[in-house]
């Protein structure tokens, strides 16, 4: 899609904007994203879910079962199993997310619906253009 704006109405100087853009869903909101634009701020929902996955991994390493971890957080064991992969994200992806430099389409929903390979280079190819 492309956006063009001509002369504004009323007194003042004319301004023209011509830029490629896309509309991206992010949770319940839709964002207007200029081509090549990165997220402007860290996605706190995404960060919180990654932190939760790391916490679950720590609990499992300490001897807890997935069922016990799920009961502590009042979620289904399948939820823990499906989301724990975030504890294995590449450092480059984690840094981009923490700095808000992830692509706008990389949301918590997308991350947790994507089956990611373990090799970091493969993850980066999928999640970071």
Image: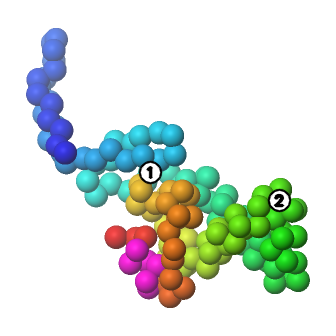
Residue 117 visible, this orientation: yes
Q: What residue is shown at x 61% (from left), y 71% (from top)?
A: 86
Q: What residue is shown at x 70% (from left), y 64% (from top)?
A: 79
Q: Nearer the viewer, residue 88 or 113?
A: 113
Q: What residue is shown at x 54% (from left), y 79% (from top)?
A: 90
Magenta stretch: helix, strand or loop mostly? helix
- Decide: is 116 above or below 18: below
Quarter of the figure with the C terminus: bottom left
Q: Would residue 88 be found to the left or right of residue 114 on screen?
A: right
Q: Nearer the viewer, residue 33 or 56?
A: 56
Q: Is label 1 in contact with label 2 (beta carbons under 8 Å)?
A: no
Which SS class for mark 2?
A: loop
Residue 53 visible, this orientation: no
Residue position marked by numbered label 2 in the rendering: 73
Residue occupying the far top of the picture? 10
Which numbered tag is attached to residue 40?
1
Quarter of the figure with the N terminus: top left
Magenta stretch in the rendered image: 121-126
Q: 10 Å neighbourhood of mark 2: few (<14), some, or many (≥20)?
A: few
Q: What residue is shown at x 16% (from left), y 11% (from top)?
A: 10
Which numbered tag is attached to residue 110?
none
């Amino acid at each position: 899609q492309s956006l063009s704006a001509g002369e504004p109405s009323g007194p003042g100087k004319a301004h023209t904007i011509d830029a490629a853009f896309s509309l991206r869903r992010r949770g319940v909101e839709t964002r207007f994203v200029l081509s090549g634009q990165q997220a402007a701020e860290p996605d706190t929902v995404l960060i919180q879910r990654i932190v939760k996955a790391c916490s679950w991994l720590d609990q499992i390493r300490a001897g807890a079962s997935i069922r016990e971890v799920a009961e502590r957080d009042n979620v289904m064991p399948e939820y823990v199993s499906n989301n724990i992969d975030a504890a294995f994200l590449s450092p480059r992806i984690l840094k981009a997310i923490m700095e808000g430099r992830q692509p706008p389409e990389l949301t918590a929903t997308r991350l947790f619906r994507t089956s990611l390979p373990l090799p970091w280079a493969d993850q980066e190819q999928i999640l970071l253009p």
